[in-house]
Image (cartoon, rainbow, N blue to C red):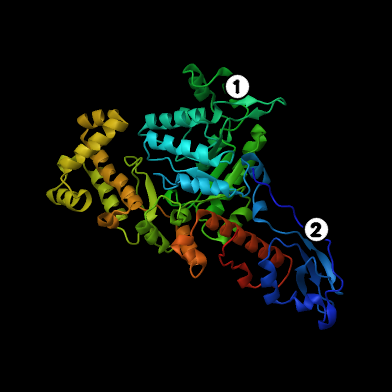
Amino acid sequence: MHSTPTAPSPTTVDPHQHGRHGPAAERLGAFSPQGLVRLVQQPRSAVRLLARPGDGARGAVPVTVAADGCTELGVLPGVYPEWLGDRGFLQAHGVRYPYVCGEMANGISTVDLVAAVAAGGVLGFFGAAGLAPRRVEEAVLALGRRCGDASWGVNLIHSPAEPRAEEETVELLLRHRVPCVSASAFMELTAPVVRCAVAGLRTDRAGAVVRARRVFAKVSRPETARMFMSPAPRELLDELVRSGRISVHEARLAESVPVAEDVTVEADSGGHTDNRSLTTLLLRILRLRDAVERAHGHRVRVGAAGGLGTPDAVAAAFAMGAAYAVTGSVNQTAVEAGMSPQARQLLAAADVDEVTMAPSADMFELGARVQVLSKGTMFAVRAQRLYELYRRHSGLDELSGQDLAWLEREVLRAPVAEVWRETERYWRGRDPGQCARAATDDKHRMALLFRWYLGQSTRWAIEGCADRRADYQLWAGPALGAFNAWVADSFLAAPGERTVVQIARNLLEGAAVVTRAQQLRTCGLPVPDTAFRFVPRPLA
């Protein structure tokens, strides 16, 4: 558990600070733009708001400085990074900061990354999507050992094409008592995700419902948000009871609590995204949350994700009412991320307009898309051509000679038959039903072959395969470009300094600075634009 700071007393005044050099307020630049910039950079210090006699100009000094004949308008307490979000979030999860390091699939959010942020008072999610159950279990066991009583979590991704994989992941999460689960890419509630939320429900001595684990739901549509904010549907609960996966008592308790108490609004993020605007989507979901709370009488916290790559963006999310902030793309450049140095170099050079949408390996047949880096890689172009071929043809035999030559030369770099044998071996070990279907469905066989490339392209980036650099699939949103511009010329520009904890603390510290600057500006002080600029620095 991490404690939050206590605000300093705003009543301390030293009447002797004015000295022989004139009033202390004037000497400290209380009424000058330069003085206000210095004051804003110390957001934890309480400040005294002043009005100057004669011209009525407004200024501010630390509370330890006397008013010196100025009219005291009031006192602003310190702004702490710990206090930017919902205090209930900190208490519920036992963390210090209202900040989450979101999951990145294929283990890009590594055990090292999650353990590092847990030690730093931040909740992090391991990126389990795309990994074999054995690797997920190894990660879960390692995190249990390394994190101790600190909060941590694992991702559960919706897998409509592989329902068994979703069920196996839930079984694993329950068996090893994972404390937090981030459910992503769900378009509707499924029996596995509902089981994850309600299995183990009980009541304490006061009769309050206690959860065995906390589910976070990542959403980008109001209708999906409503499902997770509401109690689980009776038909799914009945199905789980009939199959023996939850008890009658657990089902009864589930009717009085939401599926997820923490709902993350995902805007224009890397990877799976609907490219929504955070300023519109977050407010829409917050209003929906208010309506659901009135209807059901339970609390739901709403967090913000997507587009959060600078302190200004993080401060804006909190100002709109976000209970917590979630980062993703920016953490791929951290030293703890499961990403090769070659890939991190490409990510660290990205600008805000150097991302694009491309077909996704999971839900490929449904036309699902992910946001990826476009600069320095041909992945998006090649993946899009594969999807167009899939849409136009019923099987590989229908491909033209030109398309087949391109497929084997540029994409697979091997004969189709050779890659299919590798693909078939993979699916026989993961889901034999896919191979059985491919044996009688040429279009499905083509989809599995194309998905080989889409899946391998991420692993080539993770492993740093030099001869496949042009095929790296790197999930990224515009926030990454904004982050790169912000850290340029600071200590975080150096790859070795980009630890996930330093990224988190600088974003939050900067958000506190921006919040303080806006506070003073709304109080009528002449706060210059430069006061809103926070330069990253090493933070303990």
Q: Residues within 10 Å of mark 1 (few under 14, many from 20)?
A: some
Q: Which residue occupies 67% across, 76% down?
A: 34
In the rendered image, residue 67, in percent from the top left (x then y), is placed at: 84, 71
- The outermost residue toward the front is 145
Mark 2 or 1: in front is 2
Q: Secondary structure at mark 1?
A: helix
Q: Amino acid at mark 2?
A: Ser
Splitting the image into 4 quarters, where does residue 539 fall? bottom right
In the rendered image, residue 374, in percent from the top left (x then y), is placed at: 35, 59
- The outermost residue toward the bottom is 21
312 relative to 269 in the view: left or right: right
Q: CA distance from mark 2 to mark 1?
A: 48 Å
232 relative to 371 in the view: left or right: right
Q: Is residue 536 above or below residue 356?
A: below
Q: Secondary structure at mark 2?
A: loop
Q: Which residue occupies 84% across, 66% down?
A: 13
Splitting the image into 4 quarters, where does residue 519 fall? bottom right
- The quadrant of the rendering that contains the N terminus is top right
Mark 2 and mark 1 lie on one chain; the one further toward the N terminus is: 2
381 relative to 539 in the view: left or right: left
Which numbered tag is attached to residue 18? Answer: none
Q: Residues within 10 Å of mark 2 (few under 14, many from 20)?
A: few
In the rendered image, residue 368, in percent from the top left (x then y), is placed at: 37, 44
Which numbered tag is attached to residue 252? Answer: 1
On the question of residue 434 being in view, the answer is: no
Q: Is residue 232 above or below residue 64?
A: above
- Total numbered labels placed on residues in the image: 2
Q: Amino acid at mark 1?
A: Arg
- In the image, 226 versus 327, the foreground residue is 327
On the question of residue 346 being in view, the answer is: yes
In the rendered image, residue 136, in percent from the top left (x then y), is placed at: 42, 37
Query: Label 2 belongs to which residue?
Result: 9
